[in-house]
Image (cartoon, helix red, strand yellow):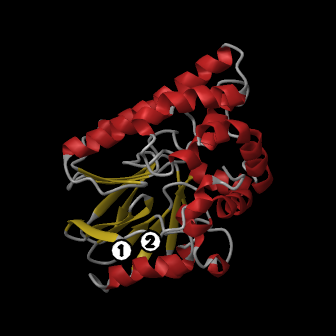
Amino acid sequence: MSKQFASHADVEEKQVTFKQLAPGVYAYTAEGDPNTGIIIGEQSALVIDTQATPVMAEDVIRRVREVTDKPIKHVLMSHYHAVRVLGASAYQPENIIASRQTFELIQERGQQDFESEVGRFPRLFAGVESVPGLTWPNVVFDGRMTLDLGNRRVEIMHVGRGHTKGDTIAWLPEEGILFAGDLVEYGATPYSGDAYHKDWPQTLGNLLALNPNQLVPGRGDALTSPEQCREAIEGTRNFIRTMFQSVADGRARGLSLADCYKETYAQLAPQYGHWVIFDHCLPFDITRCYDEAGDHADPRIWTAERDTEMWHSLQQVLEQQS
């Protein structure tokens, strides 16, 4: 196996689906690439996660313009990762909304995250030269807020730590539609390099308590039945629990990071190895699990240099898995 990140072999463009979930509610999905949500009211529209660059956001805008001429006044960051938010400038929104914890993460590590993510997964940053800089919110909320789009109420909530400390959901209570960001994945491997694995299962329990009828995950198809929603939430929770417990047990037995990686990979691969970006995520995920099971309650900052150092340090194990 090359010492390049596994994602560098992922060069095939994905087929985009723009699916209506209810009148004025859409999911923009692309075969396991990052998803975008659109909610349209009588006065304005909200976009949830903007795509990674303004160039990529133009395709979202084109599809929105096929169904409405309402202004896209609002952009919501489900969390701070560059691949989710750096296309925001293309929408020219009045409001960019983020949780207090997400704002803190942008302050702390936004630039390092940008540089790290572009290096890891270049295909997801088409037209990266069009990014004017970090995306900064001008509306920062604590806990929850309600957004009125004109005869349509959107509940925006931080329901617990998981994928990051700032994860934010958008909830349409009348329709029972949930935009979960990367708290939930479907047929795609959760990236947990900045996660709180000890908290994430309870946060997913909070989502289950909403009893959604439909759900847009961070990656994967939009889900259109309560049964599918439960399957996706529980599937994400089972993956996180199994992975963290394996690494924590290994570390408690005195295993090195590389040995924990080998053991946990072997445990997860039979059930989850077919999920999108499995080989890309696992080194970052297991490294964070190893940290969290030890002395790092909060995620360490990933830099381009740290990415490469970690990847090379696990190279021998990675080659054994190939």
Which residue of the protein is positioned furthest toward the top in this rendering? 253
Image quarter of the C terminus: top right
Q: Position of residue 270 (x, y in %)?
A: 43, 33
User: Does residue 165 appear in the picture of this structure?
Assistant: no
For badge 1, the amino acid type reads Ala
The answer to whether one can see residue 137 in this image is yes
Please give the name of the residue rendered at 59% of the width and 57% of the height, measured from the top-left corner. Answer: 7
In 3D space, how far apart are the residues under numbered discs 1 and 2 (Cα atoms)? 6 Å
Amino acid type assigned to the residue bearing label 2 in the image: His
> Which structural element holds mark 2?
strand
Q: What's the mark number on residue 208?
A: none
Name the residue: 60% across, 79% down. Answer: 127
238 relative position to 130: left or right: left
| Label 1 vs 2, first from the N-terminus | 1
Quadrant in the rendering for residue 209: top left
Residues at circles 1 and 2 in contact by the CB criterion of under 8 Å: yes
The secondary element bearing badge 1 is classed as strand
Horizontal and vertical percent for residue 94? 50, 76
What mark, if any, has residue 74 been given in the picture? Answer: 2
* In the depicted structure, whether residue 95 falls above or below residue 320: below
Q: Is residue 170 left or right of residue 25?
A: right
Q: Nearer the viewer, residue 321 or 56?
A: 321
- Number of numbered discs: 2
Residue name at image x 46 percent, y 71 percent? 13
Q: In the figure, 163 relative to 243: above or below?
A: below
Numbered mark located on residue 45 in the image: 1
